[in-house]
Amino acid sequence: MSIAPLERSAGRSPDQSTDQSTGRSAREDQAFRALDVVMDPELDEPVTDLGFVRSVDVAQTDAGVRVSVHLRLPTSFCSPNFAYLMASDAKDALTSLPWVDTVVVELDDHHDSDLINAGLAADAGYRGTFRHEAERDLDELRATFRRKAHTAAMERCLTDWLRADRDRAEADAGRVRLRDLPASDHTDSLLRRREALGLSLGADDLVLVDAEGRSYAEGEVPMALRRARSTRISVDGNAHFCRGLLRTRYEGSGADQTQRSDGAEPGDHHHLIPLTVKETHR
């Protein structure tokens, strides 16, 4: 199946204006931006930043305004659970737009595409789509990834705090409060993750807490921080890996990816170490 980026159908939306930089009409761009809230649950990044949105089409039909979106993933064997979560969240985000009458979201080139697309079209829900294969409840899956995202965001903030002053030790991280964090993207991300878990956002609240908001004893802080760092490294590493796989699988898809706020990927660096031949004299 081949779909050109931002492919458009013959039935045009009421808004004919097109943004030359994106190739999208105003409403197509609005639909695309609505997908900013859809996160890859494992990578904790928006599908729009990852390049997972293959095409967006807004068309006027006899039944009203229809939005059609095609999603793509780095491999054909990405977790069906994750794939369904993203596709389902995409449909919900687009359905919330007040001017939309019909939403069609389809996942391309995945080994469970037919199953997932049929379930989405029928609004069958997670268990209705996967039936006996649905080992876990959808809300349980979401909660698992929210906890993981919070842990990674917490570690980023505390690492920034430690690096800001060489005299600070890991054990000191257990006493850092939200008011001690600087205004930054990392802080904003942590606050969003805390809110998603139902944790307090008070200025005096400790930063280093578990998913239930419980703090750590002083002797437990270094190990808790190291475990959090391991989680963050896993999330960041998977994000770099999946971005590279997508670019390999879909030529030109790199143009649809937004550079990560934490810096370029290893594959983006092209400064090679100069090699010289060293003579050996015997």
Image (cartoon, rainbow, N blue to C red):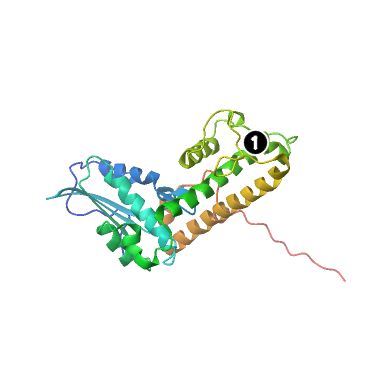
Q: Position of residue 22 (x, y in %)?
A: 33, 46
Q: Position of residue 111 (x, y in %)?
A: 38, 69
In what quadrant of the picture does the N terminus appear?
bottom left
Q: Nearer the viewer, residue 262 or 148?
A: 148
Element on which disc 1 rests: helix
Q: Position of residue 161 (x, y in %)?
A: 65, 36
Q: Nearer the viewer, residue 16 or 13?
A: 13
For the image shown, how many numbered marks are present on the structure?
1
Residue 21 visible? The answer is: no
Crowd rating for badge 1 (residues with CA inside 10 Å; few <14, some 14–19, many 20+)? some
In what quadrant of the picture does the C terminus appear?
bottom right
| Rendered residue at 21%/54% (across/down) | 9
Residue 97 visible? The answer is: yes
Q: Position of residue 98 (x, y in %)?
A: 24, 39
Q: Amino acid at mark 1?
A: Trp
| Rendered residue at 53%/55% (across/down) | 240
| Rendered residue at 53%/56% (across/down) | 238
Q: Residue furthest right?
A: 282
Identify residue for label 1: 161
